[in-house]
Amino acid sequence: MNAWLRRALIALVVLLVLGGGAYYWLVLESGTPSGTFALDIKEVRRLADSLPGPKALAIHDEHVATFAFRRNLVLAGDGWAPLPMAVFAYKVDYGPHIVIVDTGLSPRGAQELGATIDEDAYRRVRSALKYAAVIVVTHEHNDHIGGLLASPWMELELAHAKLTTEQVAHLDDYNPSYRKEGFATYKPVSYARYLAVAPGVVLIKAPGHTPGSQMVYVKLANGQEYLFTGDVAWTMRNIDTRRERARATTLVLKEDRDAVLAQLAALNALKAAEPKLHIVPGHDLDAVTALEDKGLLVKTFGNGRAT
């Protein structure tokens, strides 16, 4: 073997080793958190009972849009088959009034995501926003706040929206064309760990996926409990396996990976300790459909108003 061929083979081996290492790190390896995420469910429950008035009767959901990501991008090391996912909005129905959790996205937002929008579902969410007593979003990405930002009545609906300081501060990072003038006099809410916003509804600060990420706990009048994780977990498998999205995904999203891994570990422990608590991941079509089939979520908003 001459020197040139030897050097070429050595270079090829080095490239393969480096390439294999990079692929493992970017796509296959999830990692472990360096710290922990405190989720005090007893305190959350106390706050859920702290506000006067009856709790909600039911939770309705809308599948505003559908799309698919490769499984590795959703959960590191899960293969390259496509995974069907959905964009959701939720209506917490009190009877006389409603609370909206996440607002879906607009047709333009669906096009940018590469998703197929359900026009009827979008119209029902848009109608519900007009009648909502309280509007909250799990974070500032367009597929969760986009329905509000695209609303022709956004300025009026903001009067009922409890967006956080972090969410408003980072809106422009993820929604560069939003109507900034509509926020000229808006005053966001600020809280340290938990905040009760309606009877049975508590916000749980969980920065990581975005700076303004939070989870939303809901307790109904019948005692059923729900935890909407937002995009802390795209799917239940992220929680069950305590595995994050591929690093290739989190680098694009500019996510705090260590924080999300700690949150997934906390959710995994909570699921084991509280099997009757219904955890609802951000985009898990199967998980939401299963809750609908059990009558724990009601599919579609109806006319958008309270029942």
Image (cartoon, helix red, strand yellow):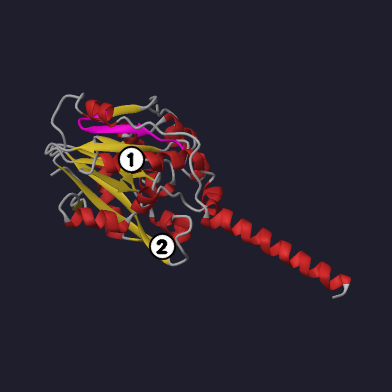
Q: Secondary structure at mark 2?
A: strand
The local crowd at label 2, few if under 14, some if 14 to 19, many if 20 or more residues have their Cα within 10 Å, is: some
* Whole-percent x, y for residue 278 in the image: 24, 45
**Number of marks:** 2
Which quadrant would the N terminus be assigned to in this image? Answer: bottom right
Task: Say what amino acid the circle numbered 2 marks.
Answer: Ala
| Residue 258 is a magenta residue | no
For marks 1 and 2 on the same chain, the one whose residue lies earlier in the sequence = 2
Give the answer, above or below, for where 1 lies relative to 165.
Answer: below
Q: The residue tagged with tag 1: helix, strand or loop?
A: helix
Q: Pointer 2: what residue?
A: 68
- From the viewer's side, name the closer residue of 175 and 213: 213
Region of the chain picked out in magenta, as a range: 197-209
Task: From the top left corner, tell me how far across and down residue 170 is, in percent.
Answer: 49, 37
At a point 87% along the width and 74% down the height, the residue shown is 2
- In this rendered view, identify the residue nearer to me: 102 or 14: 14
x and y percent of residue 197 in the render?
27, 29
Q: Residue 187: x, y in percent? A: 40, 26
